[in-house]
Amino acid sequence: MGVVSRPDQVSLGVLVAAVPRFKVDEAVAVCGVEERRRGGKLPPHVTAYLTMALCLFAEDGTEEVAQKVTGSLSAFGVWDARWAPPTSSGITQARKRLGRDVLRETFYRVAEPIAQLATRGAWLRGRRLVAIDGFDVDVPDTAENAAEFGYAGNTQARSAFPKVRVVALTECGSQAFIDAEVGPWAHSEKAMAATLLPTLSSDWLLMADRCFYSFEAFSAAALTGAALCWRAPTQLRLPVLEVLSDGTYLSVLIDPQIRGQHRARLLAEAKSGAKPDPAAAHVVRIIEYDIPNRDSSELIVLITNIHDPADVTAAELAGSYQQRWEAEAPNGQLKMLPRGPGRVLRSRSPDLVHQEVWAYLLVQHAISALICQAASGADIDPDRVSVIKAARAALSRPSYSSTHYSQDLARSCGHDAAGT
């Protein structure tokens, strides 16, 4: 008859395939988290997978999740079948021993771009499309969480729950998170993004909204060699240096700290065609267009360091910026994973909140990898498949292995992706 996989085996198979044991062990070693009792049934790597399972089975209680997944963890070599499922208090204590950093370090080792050359919506003229954006997650209203993360709003009108702020780099083709920063609500998205920009690769095209623009941020991103396509803030002054054949024009970004004669000299040098010192100024290309079918006309102004229209056309860059809006989808989907829309995380202390957020980021990456593989095989855009639907399907197909589920999802994508 053959082996029959249970739903939890399918879903955990996805996790173990995307988050291999050796990478968890590397993170444990880097963080100095050692097993306190030799042979204990909740060593760090088991606790890490249980924490991810708590995210995958977000609607269920802690002990119920442990009952569901321990048999499957045994099949994947991270659980001893002789052990009894742990209690809720036992899991909480094990999570406290694991600490806030192990799953963050695991994410950094796992979260790589996953789009293939055949993945639709992933590339523009050989450049991998990525986007940066931020979102918030509600956490339980405890004194510790309030002190660590803070509330949105003010004392007169504040949010009902403390909020964690997350800023993430997303691969547009797969919609997978590939880098992230987690912090308190009071930290600005722009400040948190500053730690992510130096990690860009030279073969990427990064898109960002106007709230992320500053001369310092643009410079930091440009220094990596990556192509950039950022929306300009409305107050930014963009002098016209040269109008190009496609109606776009060259302009110059000058450090706002530079004023007077020095600024005038930099502008004159840019107009003459001289290449400015990147510490002081950047020659950029400006694309302007409006969006039809809106209540009021809205002018979109994009800044790019791709100067030549023959390299990438204005229409292509405008279309790619649309992909940035699509890349906001995983932010909303991740916010829906914790126990359904409008719910909060489980964790009642800051260390466990950090741990749980990174666990969700890992789960989202794992599911996105599965979707990307399936959608690429079906030759459709992965953004036509819902992360939420894929996660639920993985939990409800009792006779499917992880590989069979991916194949079935690919067939489903090809026939009824429009309904996902």
Image (spheres, rainbow, N blue to C red):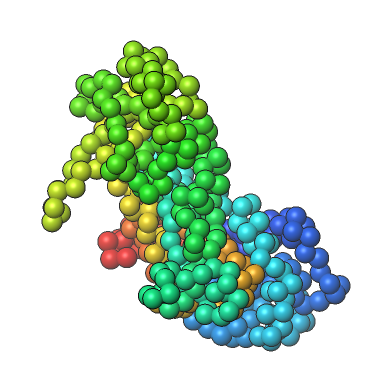
Residue 97 in sight from this viewpoint: yes
Residue occupying the far front of the picture: 260
- Is residue 78 in view? no
Image quadrant in which you'd find residue 245: top left
Identify the residue at horizontal 31%, vertical 26% (top origin): 251
Q: How many marks?
A: 0
Query: Taking 77 as reference, is 313 above or below it?
Result: above
In the image, what residue occupies the spot 39% across and 20% down? 261
Front residue of 29/85: it is: 29
Give the residue displayed 53% in from the left and 83% down from the top: 60
Q: Residue at x 60, y 76 (%)?
A: 144
Tell me: residue 199, above or below residue 309: below
In the image, 180 versus 368, the foreground residue is 180
Q: Tell me where residue 395 appears, x and y as whole percent.
A: 49, 75
Quarter-of-image position of residue 14: bottom right
Q: x and y percent of residue 274 in the render?
A: 40, 14
Q: Answer with the quarter of the image where residue 294 lies.
A: bottom left
Q: Nearer the viewer, residue 155 or 236?
A: 155
Q: Quadrant of the N terminus?
A: bottom right
Residue 119 horizontal/vertical position (percent): 41, 46
Looking at the picture, how far across and down is residue 384, in whole percent? 33, 58
Q: Answer left or right for 363 relative to 375.
A: right
Q: In this rendering, would 183 be left or right of 238?
A: right
> Where is the C terminus found, in terms of image quarters?
bottom left
